[in-house]
């Protein structure tokens, strides 16, 4: 008599391989999206630089040069673009992390189910007098499940706190940038 079903073991190995493929696919997809974000930002920045150079080449007098120079000093617009880029990157990373966590969570649930089935098979086939050992095994399994659930809840709470903190910081930075832009505009 064997406690291990080779078909279940093979099925579990296939499931793990599928999980690895799904995670790899998600990572590659995210890297591709990050590259697209970077190229979009680079293209926009390059276009702005060429526009600025064209304007600079069209300057004919000192007053026009001074006005052009003042228009180049737009920290508010630059900060807004940087904040938007960082927000997009953060959203991408958060989304990827959440998707991978969901995949891993499903795999952990499947693994837990398999372990419980194995413990049940062991309990059914245990010799007389082994009940205390089986009870300890079941108790350890329940404790491990509780610890995992607690850790998972704590991780989700930490992620929510971090996300709220980042959103608040981005909002405050955006507001400070707008106020600085208004103050700079008022000095002209």
Image: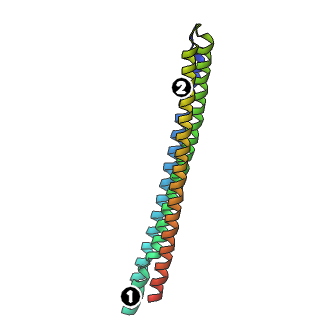
Residue 116 vertical placement versus 158 (above, below): above
In what quadrant of the picture does the N terminus appear? Answer: top right
Point out the image quarter for the C terminus: bottom left
In depth, the one of 81 and 109 nearer the eye is 109
Across and down, in percent, residue 53 comes to 40, 77
As helix, strand or loop, the secondary structure at mark 2 comes to helix
* Comparing labels 2 and 1, the label whose residue is closer to the camera: 2
- Residue 110, picture quadrant: top right
The answer to which of 116 and 12 lies nearer the viewer is: 116
- Which residue is pictured at 58% across the width and 10% down the height? 126
Per the image, the residue denoted by label 2 is 140
Image coloring type: rainbow
**SS for tag 1?**
helix
Which residue is the site of mark 1? 65
Disc 2 and disc 1: Cα gap in Å? 77 Å
Residue 61, quarter of picture:
bottom left
Mark 2 residue crowding within 10 angstroms, few (<14) / some (14–19) / many (20+): few
């Amino acid at each position: 008599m064997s406690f291990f079903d080779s078909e279940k073991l093979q099925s579990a190995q296939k499931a793990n391989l599928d999980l690895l493929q799904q995670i790899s696919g998600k990572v590659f997809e995210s890297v591709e999206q990050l590259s697209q974000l970077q190229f979009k930002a680079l293209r926009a920045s390059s276009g702005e630089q060429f526009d600025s150079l064209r304007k600079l080449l069209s300057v004919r007098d000192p007053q026009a040069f001074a006005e052009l120079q003042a228009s180049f000093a737009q920290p508010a617009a630059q900060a807004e673009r940087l904040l938007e880029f960082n927000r997009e990157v953060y959203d991408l990373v958060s989304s990827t992390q959440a998707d991978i966590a969901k995949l891993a969570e499903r795999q952990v649930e499947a693994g837990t189910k398999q372990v419980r089935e194995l413990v049940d098979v062991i309990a059914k086939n245990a010799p007389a007098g082994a009940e205390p050992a089986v009870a300890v095994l079941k108790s350890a399994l329940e404790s491990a499940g509780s610890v995992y659930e607690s850790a998972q809840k704590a991780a989700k709470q930490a992620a929510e706190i971090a996300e709220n903190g980042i959103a608040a910081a981005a909002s405050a930075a955006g507001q400070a940038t707008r106020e600085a832009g208004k103050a700079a505009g008022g000095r002209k």
